[in-house]
Structures are given as C-alpha cells and as structure tokens.
Amino acid sequence: MALFLLIVGFLVAAQLRSRQPFRQAATLPTWRLQELAMLVRQQEEARRRLQAEVDALRGQALDYEAALTEGRSLTEAMSRDLQRFRMVLGLVPVEGPGIQVILAPGAPLVGVLPAGSPFSTELQAQDLAGLANELWSAGAEAMAVNGVRILATTGIRQDGPRIMADGTALNPPFRVEAIGNPAALRAAMAIRGGFVEGLLAVGLRVEVKTRPKLRLPARTSVEPFRYSRPQVVQ
C-alpha cells in the first residue's frame, strides 16, 4: 500500500509538472496576440492616413490638370478672339477674292459700265467715301485704297486739292480693292440708278474688275481712344 501510494503521488506530481509548460505556452501567445493586434491596429491607422494623403494629392493633381486644361482652352479662345479683333481692326494683312474698282477723272471706260456724261470733273473726297460705303454695304470684309488699308470708320476727307484717308494723302487714279463675295460686290457697282451710275453721270471714270485673290496690307497705326472708356458694370 505504501509503495502504491508512493507511485500514485509520483505520477500526480509528474502530471502537474508536465502541465506547467502547457500553461506557460498558452499564456505567452495571448500576450503576443495582443501585441500583434495592437501593431495591426497601428499599421491600419497609418495605412488609412497614407491613403487619405494619397487621395488628397490625387485630387489636387486632378485640380491642377483641370486648371491647366481650362487655362489652355481659355488661352486658345482668347488667342482666336484676339486674331479676329486684329483682323477687324485691320492690324494684320489679309487676302481673298473680291473686286478692284478704279476711280479717276475723265470719260467712262467703254464696255465696263453704262456710259455717263462725256465731260470730265475733279474727284472729291465724298465720291471716294461714297464708293467705299457702297462696297461696305454690299458685304466687303476688308478694303484698301491705293494700298492704304481703311475701315468702315476711316474718315475720308477733303484737304484742299488733296483727299486724305487715315492721315495719308491719296492721289488719282484711286484704286479701291475690296475683299468679299465678288458677284455681290460687282452687282452693287452695276445697280441702275445707283451710286456708281451717279459717278459716271458727272463724268468720272469707273472701271470694275473681278479679282480671284487680293492682298491687302495691314494698317500702319491705330488712333487711340481719347474720350471713350469701357462701361463699368456694377
């Protein structure tokens, strides 16, 4: 009996000792799991912060690209408008189809337009200005007189015996070149009872020619606005 109890006691002690490492092994992974869980949470938080920063930078890049695209589009649109305005102001040379009208003292040229009075008369600024207005009304897009670019607002005036246009003296014969629809421009010059027929009636010589391509120079200068100012919108 004593031997049996000794053996049982030994086995119980051995069993208790053998379970102690398992208990320690079970306790150690729990702490490590907590540490790992905390590290995972920290890394996840860091990842979220980095992702938020990436998203912010990506949005900023998209904003920059949009601003660049809009700026480029705006610049291109402004460039087109500027070019168009420069054409309207006559600041660039232009070319295109149209007609050439020669206006000079003397009898009308035979076979060009209906003949007028056979006597000769002096050309006046109002004759040249009226002819230019007829061409503008017929759809002329650009015009030059004796190589001087003029606009619809160009003043053609009499200065003694001379005719002045945009500060330049013009001498007969006057070569008026107008770019536009040649058929429409020529038809305006041939209207019965129109302005050109009136010029012919007082003895001026008028010759009209269709030109497939005219080249008109740019204006040499632009008069500054002295009194007009852009309207302020409030």
Image (tube, rainbow, N blue to C red):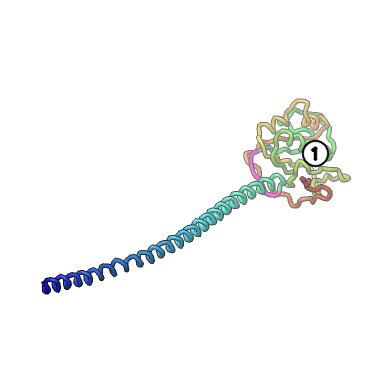
Q: Is residue 191 left or right of residue 227?
A: left
Q: Is residue 190 left or right of residue 54?
A: right
Q: Is residue 55 above or below residue 136?
A: below
Picture residue at 78% right of the left edge, 39% below the top: 104
The C terminus: image quadrant: top right
The residue at the far right in this view is: 160
Q: Is residue 210 left or right of residue 155?
A: left
Q: Secondary structure at mark 1?
A: helix
Q: Is residue 53 above or below residue 232?
A: below
Q: In this view of the protein, which residue sits in the foreground, 163 or 57?
A: 57
The residue at the far front in this view is: 1
Q: In this view of the protein, which residue sits in the foreground, 26 or 164?
A: 26
Tell me which corner region of the image, top left, top right, bottom left or bottom right, holds residue 165: top right
Q: Give the labeled residue for mark 1.
A: 129
First to last magenta residue range: 91-97
Inspect the image, locate mark 1, and give the three-letter code of the amino acid beneath it. Ala
Q: Is residue 225 left or right of residue 87?
A: right
Picture residue at 20% right of the left edge, 72% below the top: 13
Q: In this view of the protein, which residue sits in the foreground, 205 or 82?
A: 82
Q: In this view of the protein, which residue sits in the foreground, 152 or 85?
A: 85
**Residue 93 part of the magenta segment:** yes
Picture residue at 42% right of the left edge, 61% below the top: 41
Q: Position of residue 79 (x, y in %)?
A: 63, 50
Mark 1 surroundings: few (<14), some (14-19) or many (≥20) residues within 10 A = some
The N terminus: image quadrant: bottom left
Total labels drawn: 1
Picture residue at 79% right of the left edge, 51% below the top: 224
Q: Position of residue 8 (x, y in %)?
A: 15, 70
